[in-house]
Amino acid sequence: MRLSARDTLITTHRLVLAPPCRSDFAEWADLRGRSRAHLEPWEPAWPDDVHTRKDWSRRIKSWNDGWRKGRAFVFLIRRIDNSALVGGASLTNVRGWPASAANLGYWLGADHEGHGYMQEAVSSVCRWAFEVLDLWRIEAGTLPSNERSQRVLSAAGFEQEGYARDYLEIAGERQDHVLFALVRSGERG
C-alpha cells in the first residue's frame, strides 16, 4: 500500500499530526532551539549544524524518502485551536510481515509539558499505525531515568517488556533503555 504524506492527517480533539513540510522550518527550529536544554538529554547528539536550513533540508529529504519506502513516518504535532507546533512523533524501522512492527519516537517542546498532549498524540499515532499500516506491535524505549516518558507510554497502553543494555546512543553515550510495547488487540493470525 502506498501512502501519500501530503494526504495524511491524524486528528484528535485537541491536536493534528501532519508530516513536516519545508514551510515548517522556522517554527520547528524555534521550538526546538528554545527547548534545547530540555530535549538534549533524551536524544542522540545534535549535529553541529542543528536547526539550520541545511539540517532541515537533510531531514526533510530523509523523512520523505522513509515515507515513500514505507519505512518511516514522521509527524509534527500541532494544536488545533491555534495551529501552534508542540512537538513531533515518528514511527521508524517499520517492518512488514512477519514482524509487522515499528519503533515509536516522540519529543515535546518544553513549554508544552503537563497538558497531556504527548499521551494524546502517541495514542492517536499508534491507532493510525494499527489501522492504516496494519502493524501488530509498536515498540518504544526510554532512558531508565525518564519517568515522564514512561508514564506517557503506560497511559497509552504500552507495557514494559524488558531492559536493554547499551541500547541506543543518547547525548553522545551508549545508554541503557527500558523497553515497552503496545500490541494490537484482536485475534492472532
Image (cartoon, grey):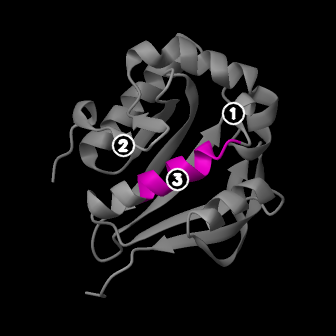
Residue assigned mark 3: 122
Q: Earlier in the sequence, mark 3 or mark 2?
A: 2
Query: Which dot marks residue 112?
Result: 1
Q: Disc 1 vs disc 2: Cβ atoms closer than 8 Å?
A: no
Amino acid type shown at disc 1? His
User: Residue 105 location, x and y as percent?
Assistant: 56, 50
Is the stretch drawn in magenta largely helix, strand or loop?
Answer: helix
Q: Residues within 10 Å of mark 2 (few under 14, many from 20)?
A: some
- Picture quadrant where residue 41 is located: top right
For residue 128, the mark is: none
Magenta residues span 115-126
Residue positioned 50% across, 20% down in the render: 56
CA separation, marks 1 and 2? 19 Å
The amino acid beneath tag 3 is Val
What residue is at 37 percent from the left and 27 percent from the top? 61
Can you see residue 151?
yes
Residue 84 in the image, given as x and y percentages of width and height:
55, 22
Mark 3 Cα-neighbour bin, 10 Å: few <14, some 14–19, many ≥20: many
Chain-order first, disc 1 or disc 2: 2
In the picture, the quarter occupied by the N terminus is bottom left
User: Can you say whether 25 is above or below 7 in the image?
Assistant: above
Q: Crowding near pointer 1: few (<14 within 10 Å), some, many (20+)?
A: some
Quadrant holding the C terminus? bottom left
The answer to whether residue 114 is above or below residue 6 is below
Residue 88: percent from the left, percent from the top?
A: 54, 37
Q: Which residue is mark 2?
A: 10
Q: Secondary structure at mark 1?
A: helix
Q: Is residue 142 left or right of residue 82?
A: right
Q: Is residue 131 magenta?
A: no
- The amino acid type found where label 2 is placed reads Ile
